[in-house]
């Protein structure tokens, strides 16, 4: 599974961190980054994708 965050779209709301803790962090610029794509189950990552207010997260693969 590949998880990408579009840095141009991300507004740093932190919803992804709430829904999939350990997978995402905010960097020094307040933009979400993927730190461990295996830290949460796929259903939690799907909630993070759906919960992103700017739709900045995409998941490809299994």
Image (cartoon, rainbow, N blue to C red):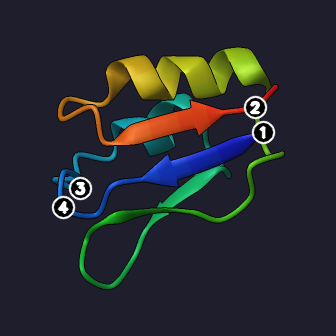
Left or right of 10? Residue 20 is right
- Residue 61 falls in which quadrant of the image? top right
For label 3, the SS is loop
- In the rendered image, the residue lying farthest to the front is 61
- Which residue is disc 4 drawn over? 8
**What x and y, as percent, mark residue 13?**
22, 46
| Position of the C terminus by quadrant | top right
**What x and y, as percent, mark residue 17?**
48, 44
- Give how far apart the Cα atoms at labels 1 and 4 are: 22 Å
- Which residue is disc 3 drawn over? 12
Q: Is residue 20 above or below residue 4?
A: above
Question: Which label's residue is closer to the chain start, 1 or 4?
Answer: 1
For label 1, the SS is loop
For label 2, the SS is loop
Q: Are marks 2 and 3 in contact (CB under 8 Å)?
A: no
For label 4, the SS is loop
Q: Which mark is residue 61?
A: 2
Residue at 61 percent of width and 46 percent of height: 3
Q: Are marks 1 and 4 in contact (CB under 8 Å)?
A: no
């Amino acid at each position: 599974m590949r998880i990408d965050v579009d840095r141009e779209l991300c507004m740093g709301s932190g919803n992804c961190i709430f829904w999939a803790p350990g997978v995402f962090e905010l960097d020094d610029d307040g933009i979400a980054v993927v730190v461990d794509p295996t830290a949460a189950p796929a259903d939690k990552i799907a909630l993070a994708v759906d919960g992103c207010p700017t739709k900045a997260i995409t998941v490809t693969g299994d």
